Structures are given as C-alpha cells and as structure tokens.
Amino acid sequence: DTILNQKELNATAKENAKLYCVYVAIGQKRSTVAQLVQILSSANALEYSIIVAATASDPAPLQFLAPYSGCALGEYFLDNGMHALIIYDDLSKQAVAYRQMSLLLRRPPGREAFPGDVFYLHSRLLERAAKRSEETGAGSLTALPVIETQAGDVSAYIPTNVIPITDGQICLETELFYRGLRPAINVGLSVSRVGSAAQLKAMKQVRGSSKLELAQYREVA
C-alpha cells in the first residue's frame, strides 16, 4: 500500500519531487514476490519501483547482501537530489542468514547463536538512510525495516537491536487482526521518537489524550 499510494503523487510531481520505491524481499517465498510484482504491475507502479529479491531458496550470502544492494540503488536517488523509499522485508531473515554464514565460518556465537556484531550489521545499513542539505543536493532516502517477531515478543534479540536505531516503530498484533481490528496496530507498543516535532499544533493537542484513550479501550475491549 505504501508503494501504491505514491502513484498519484508521482503522476503530477516534477522529476526531483517524485518518490522512487525500492522493495527488498529477503527470504520470502518466490510465489509471494511474484504476487507482489503482479500487484505493482497491474497498478502501473513498477514505473517508479525497483524490486530486489533474495528468496528463501537462494543461498544465505545472497540473502545477506540483498539489503545492501537495495540500499545502494536507493542511494543513487539520494546522491542525485531525488527522493527514495526503501523497504526491507524483512531484516530478521537477513540476520538468520548472517548467523548461518558466521557459524559455518566458526565465528564465536553470542546470544541466540548470533555473532557479536549483529547490531552493527543493521546499524550500518539503516544509518545510510538520510536527508541531504540544500547545499548537497537536497535528496532523501527513507528506510522502512520490517522485523518478524515470535508470538509478538518485541523483547527478542533482533527486535531490540533494530528498535533503538529507528525513529519509531509500528507494532502489529495477530490477535487484533483476527478480532477484526485493522490495521492491527498495538497502540501501547507503537512509538514515535520524532513525536510532536513533526506534527501541527492542532494534532499535538488531539494526540495527547487520544492515544491513551485508545490504549485503554483496547485493554477492556
């Protein structure tokens, strides 16, 4: 939906105002990637989209390198004064591929058998997303990393590594989805570290109480 929503904007925007999208599929099924391509193609969204895929049947090194390849494509737009969005789906599988490679190389395992530098694995990737100043071209690259949790446990190793790097997180909950609450966002766990700095004054006033009220409603619903 995030990629499809850019179609109307890109149809009327100037070249330097368009938003180009890079979708990196890591460890996904081939059928899932093919379905995504079909959806984007039918909506004519491939005109401004790039798909980088290292599927579940591909070797671990390819799954490890796919996010960096996608980021390099996004940086092309950043360096040339344009705007890009990159979606990593998902970085949990990249970490698993990196763990597999590290164990084969007999590197000392740490927590959950991941190597000790797994935090650096994701920080050096996500910190490449940036907004350039006017003097350096005014380009931008926005990253949306997806992390898979087991039974909604955001305190697991990989989620706790990625959360401090980002400007916030949207936590989805399976139970809410099956109860018909969609989007199935867990309001209590979802946080924005940018917060009111990016909001209008009227929105700040409404947001303060509405989030608390919604969280309380979800607890008793």
Image (cartoon, rainbow, N blue to C red):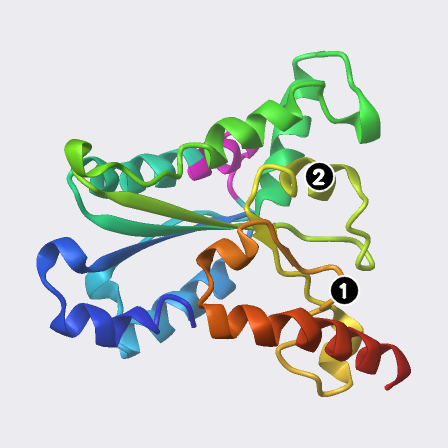
Magenta span of residues? 58-67
Residue in the image at 68% along x and 53% along y: 148
Q: Is residue 129 above or below residue 186?
A: above
Residue that mark 2 sits on: 158
Lower sequence index among marks 1 and 2: 2
Residue 186 colored magenta? no
Q: Residues within 10 Å of mark 1 (few under 14, many from 20)?
A: some
Residue 209 versus residue 139: which sits nearer the camera? 209
Left or right of 58 on screen, residue 186: right
Residue 61 included in the magenta stretch of the image: yes
Image location of residue 121, percent across then percent down: 57, 27
Give the position of the N terminus as an image quadrant.
bottom left
Residue 201: numbered disc = none
Q: In the rendered structure, which amino acid carries the disc numbered 2?
A: Ile
Where does the image place residue 122, in percent across and percent down from the top left?
56, 32
In this rendering, the label closer to the viewer, 1 or 2: 1
Q: Separation of disc 1 and disc 2 at Cα? A: 20 Å
At horizontal 74% and vertical 26% (from top left) the residue drawn is 114
- Which label belongs to residue 188? 1
